[in-house]
Image: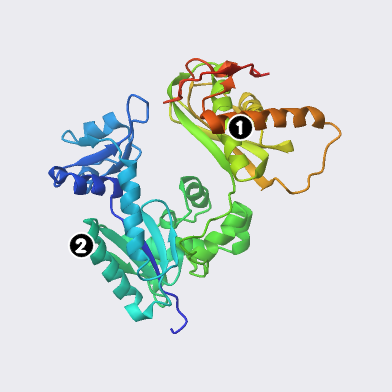
């Protein structure tokens, strides 16, 4: 068809591990895993080579379990500066064919080459990218070629490594609909389980379910999945320099030791909220809600959120709202391993606000001026030049730094 789009999705194979083996040829032909620091309790597999994968090593697996499955496993620490470097070099290759290059993480990109016919068809451009990436960077990619972003992504996952898969408009039902629903982008474990309860187990089942039923089950996301399954998604591939609107601002950490008391959780939330407040100021945004994510030491995670009675950038207000959520919602059956706090429902700072007669605006204005002064001191003398007194000492946060000036801080209420 003349109007059919040509969309590519390029996925760099075992990216972190492949970069490590390219930088250190002695690792080639051996089972390799890039892992976080066990000492700082980030000891999980971030990436693995094909040999490690064949031995049963999976991303997200804890280090000791990976070593048990693969006794000869070579564990290396991540080198993020190198991964960023090679990600940028790959993006430079993609941009030789089109400026419509939309990153999807560090190692994946969509490309719209519909208007790049001078370089050949979508399949020919995909083949050129695959070979160029191998020749110039020593890395391999798997590429999906299709008429929309969703199926291009699905194609890049179907055959790995170093492969190209085309999903065409006239026969996608035969190839795609028999696949498990979980193969479709944005169908995670929770959504897949919910669909399975209704007997929706394949992409074809999803496509043939009434849109109204899916809306009832999953809200607006149900309608999106129906379009994805039926091949009617028309979302654009954005230009490489496109900056998407900020939808939330958050900060999270895996603690160096379990948090044993509510006081410890509050101190971590207050420390994390310093960064959240700073970035809200940088983007000139205000948060109308707060969201927290708590992971216990059995690795079970739970998420809660709430609306605020006012919009804010103030770290202590964000932390207090997050801690109130925690005390009301979290069932303390296990100690806390990781904490994340986010400002959500963001609005521009300059947008008019309806004030409430039940909020002491004068007190909040004074606090905002104080935070302005703190922000200026930190800008001039460093992030840890000034802090709350209650944040002194061991917060059980990796590399939390040492503070040289203190000020009185509000402990949790």
| 3D distance between C-alphas at marks 2 and 1 | 48 Å
Q: Quadrant of residue 96?
A: bottom left
Q: How is the image coloured?
A: rainbow
Q: Residues within 10 Å of mark 2 (few under 14, many from 20)?
A: few
Residue found farthest to the bottom: 2
Residue at image coords 19%, 36%: 73
SS under mark 2: helix
Q: In the figure, 158 relative to 346: above or below?
A: below
- The location of residue 254, given as percent across then percent down, is 44, 29
Is tag 2's residue or tag 1's residue first in the polypeptide sequence?
2
- The location of residue 222, given as percent across then percent down, is 57, 57
Q: Does 172 sit left or right of 366 as displayed?
A: left
Q: How many marks?
A: 2
Q: What label sits on residue 135 in the rendered view?
A: 2
Q: In the figure, 146 relative to 360: above or below?
A: below
Q: In the figure, 1 relative to 333: above or below?
A: below
Q: Residues within 10 Å of mark 1 (few under 14, many from 20)?
A: some
In the image shown, does 373 or 237 lie closer to the viewer? 373
Residue at image coords 22%, 43%: 52
In the image shown, does 96 or 336 lie closer to the viewer? 96
Residue found farthest to the right: 357
Residue found farthest to the front: 380
Q: Tell which tag, 2 or 1, sits nearer the viewer.
A: 1
The residue where tag 1 is placed is 375
In the picture, the quarter occupied by the N terminus is: bottom left
Q: Are marks 2 and 1 in contact (CB under 8 Å)?
A: no
Q: Is residue 360 visible?
A: no
- The location of residue 91, given as percent across then percent down, is 36, 59
């Amino acid at each position: 068809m003349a109007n059919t789009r040509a969309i590519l999705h390029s996925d760099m194979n075992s990216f972190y591990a492949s970069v490590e083996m390219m930088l250190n040829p002695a690792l080639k032909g051996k089972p390799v895993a890039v892992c976080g620091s066990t000492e700082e309790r980030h000891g999980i597999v971030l990436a693995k080579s094909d040999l490690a994968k064949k031995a049963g090593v999976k991303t997200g697996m804890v280090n000791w379990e990976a070593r048990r499955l693969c006794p000869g496993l070579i564990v290396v620490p991540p080198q993020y500066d190198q991964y960023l470097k090679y990600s940028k070099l790959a993006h430079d290759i993609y941009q030789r064919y089109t400026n419509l290059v939309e990153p999807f993480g560090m190692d994946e990109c969509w490309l719209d080459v519909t208007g790049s016919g001078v370089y050949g068809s979508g399949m020919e451009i995909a083949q050129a990218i695959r070979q160029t990436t191998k020749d110039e960077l020593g890395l391999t990619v798997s590429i999906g070629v299709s008429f929309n972003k969703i199926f291009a992504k699905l194609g890049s996952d179907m055959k790995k490594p170093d492969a190209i898969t085309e999903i065409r408009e006239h026969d996608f039902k035969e190839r795609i609909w028999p696949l498990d629903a979980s193969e479709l982008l944005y169908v995670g474990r929770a959504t897949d389980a919910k669909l399975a309860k209704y007997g929706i187990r394949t992409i074809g089942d999803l496509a043939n379910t009434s849109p109204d039923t899916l809306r009832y089950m999953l809200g607006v996301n149900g309608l999106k999945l129906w379009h994805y399954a039926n091949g009617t998604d028309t979302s654009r591939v954005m230009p490489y320099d496109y900056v998407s609107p900020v939808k939330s601002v958050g900060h999270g950490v895996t603690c160096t030791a379990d948090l044993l008391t509510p006081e410890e959780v509050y101190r971590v939330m207050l420390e994390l909220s310093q960064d959240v407040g700073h970035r809200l100021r940088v983007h000139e945004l205000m948060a109308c809600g707060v969201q927290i994510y708590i992971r216990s030491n059995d690795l079970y995670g739970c998420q809660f959120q709430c609306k605020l009675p006012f919009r804010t950038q103030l770290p202590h207000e964000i932390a207090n709202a997050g801690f109130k959520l925690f005390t009301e919602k979290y069932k303390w059956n296990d100690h806390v391993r990781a904490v994340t706090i986010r400002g959500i429902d963001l609005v521009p700072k300059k947008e008019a606000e309806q004030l409430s007669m039940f909020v002491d605006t004068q007190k909040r204005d004074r606090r905002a001026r104080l935070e302005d002064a703190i922000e200026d001191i930190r800008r001039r003398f460093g992030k840890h030049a000034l802090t709350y007194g209650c944040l002194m000492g061991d917060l059980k946060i990796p590399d939390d730094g040492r503070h040289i000036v203190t000020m009185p801080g509000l402990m949790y209420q």
